[in-house]
Image: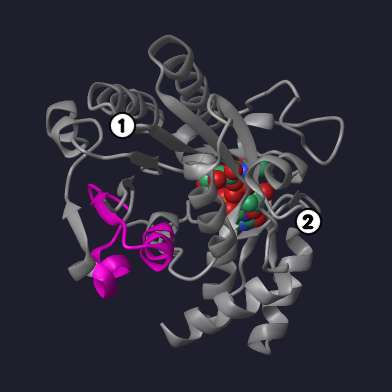
């Protein structure tokens, strides 16, 4: 019997990369649940005949619950991402990321799903004295988004210990790659930088640009998420999903300008509320328990991503 997978947020930028990865691995059976709030049918257009799609909102428990029947693994990626959006629009952010996430665990438990793999966030660490950030550090969320994502981890661990549902949380570190939507001020910074460079516009950098991130290529994240569905002995645990590198915004804007063959000095604005200063993943635990090593350097990831935006 092929494995039945369900991906919440499967029409999103990361979710659709995971769907393609799943379809490339085995003759699994993939259901996508997405309310198309930020996900797009265009992201799954090429595979639409090989998946089952439901335009369903994870806040709607009654609609969500039957979709889990017969599913073995749920990948829960549906969310309203963005640190600044969670500050300017805290209610929908809380509702989807907290109440929606509770619905996903509850429905998975009711339907006797074997395992839920949850897209957690590196923002849960907040500012730490030490880099890289290891899973044993005390979380110090600095924004509603970071707190909401942390709550989802804790709920997974409690569904594991109280209800026997297998749950694994992966803290994503600044994922980038093709299909990331640059269409909103809340979009991931690299998508905004790519768009700015291609349109000959100057981007805005919040702060001095010396804050750093562990930018992680989307295909590496998809590969890790898949491994987390099948690794034995990891239920109830949290793992970093990062590349292990650390690059400043000034550095990556420089790289994007080089790829585009432009010179456009950025505008510098005030630092953003809730922003973490530095972010870098310790990847040892994911390597040890999930047998994962990132395959894409930042240069390779940026090149592939830029090529995609240029063609899109
Ligand atoms: C955060 C989380 C990440 C999460 C993501 C979801 C951290 C360390 N990471 O990413 O785990 O998945 O939210 O959205 O908290 N910036 C600019 N100019 C812009 C846009 C952004 O300078 O036009 C800056 C931001 O101030 C920030 C950096 O770029 O310093 C990255 O921002 P963004 O791409 O939004 O991601 P994070 O907030 O780091």
The magenta span reads 18-47
In the displayed image of the protein, which residue is found farthest to the front?
1
Q: Which mark is residue 49?
A: none
Q: How far, Cα to Cα, is label 1 from label 2? A: 35 Å
Residue ID at (87%, 33%): 130
State the colouring used for the structure image.
Answer: one colour
Query: Is residue 70 left or right of 155 when viewed as pictured?
Result: left
Residue 308 coordinates in the image, percent (x, y): 49, 80
| Residue that numbered label 1 is attached to | 113
Q: Is residue 25 above or below residue 152?
A: below
Q: Determine crowd level at label 2: few under 14, some 14-19, many 20+ residues with C-alpha closer than 10 A.
A: some
Q: Is residue 61 above or below residue 74?
A: above
Q: Is residue 44 magenta?
A: yes
Q: Closest to the observer: 216 or 47?
A: 47
In the structure shown, which secondary structural element does the residue marked by tag 2 occupy?
loop
Residue ID at (38%, 65%): 20
In the structure shown, which secondary structural element does the residue marked by tag 1 occupy?
loop
Mark 1 or mark 2, which is nearer to you?
A: 1
* Disc nearer the start of the sequence (1/2): 1
Residue ID at (39%, 25%): 98
| Residue that numbered label 2 is attached to | 245
Q: Is residue 116 above or below residue 303?
A: above
């Amino acid at each position: 019997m092929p494995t039945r997978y369900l991906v919440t947020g499967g029409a999103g930028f990361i979710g659709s990369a995971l769907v393609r990865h799943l379809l490339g691995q085995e003759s699994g059976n993939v259901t996508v649940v997405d309310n198309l709030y930020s996900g797009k049918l265009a992201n799954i257009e090429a595979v639409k005949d090989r998946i089952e799609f439901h335009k369903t909102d994870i806040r709607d428990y009654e609609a969500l619950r039957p979709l889990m029947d017969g599913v073995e693994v749920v990948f829960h990626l549906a969310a309203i991402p963005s640190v600044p959006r969670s500050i300017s629009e805290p209610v929908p952010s809380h509702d989807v990321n907290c109440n929606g996430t509770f619905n996903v665990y509850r429905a998975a438990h009711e339907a006797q799903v074997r395992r839920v793999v949850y897209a957690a966030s590196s923002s849960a660490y907040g500012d730490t004295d030490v880099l890289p950030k290891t899973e044993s550090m005390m979380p110090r969320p600095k924004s509603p988004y970071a707190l909401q994502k942390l709550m989802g981890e804790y709920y997974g661990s409690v569904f594991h210990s109280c209800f026997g549902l297998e749950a694994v949380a992966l803290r994503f570190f600044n994922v980038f790659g093709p299909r990331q939507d640059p269409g909103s001020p809340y979009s991931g910074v690299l998508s905004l930088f790519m768009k700015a460079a291609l349109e000959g516009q100057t981007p805005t950098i919040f702060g001095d640009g010396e804050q750093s991130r562990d930018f992680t290529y989307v295909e590496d994240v998809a590969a890790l998420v898949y491994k987390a569905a099948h690794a034995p002995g990891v239920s109830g645990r949290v793992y970093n999903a990062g590349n292990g590198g650390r690059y400043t915004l000034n550095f990556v804007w420089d790289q994007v300008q080089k790829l585009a063959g432009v010179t456009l000095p950025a505008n510098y604005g005030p630092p953003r509320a809730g922003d973490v200063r530095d972010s870098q993943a310790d990847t040892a635990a994911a390597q040890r328990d999930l047998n994962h090593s990132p395959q894409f350097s930042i240069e390779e990831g940026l090149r592939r991503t830029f090529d995609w935006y240029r063609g899109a």
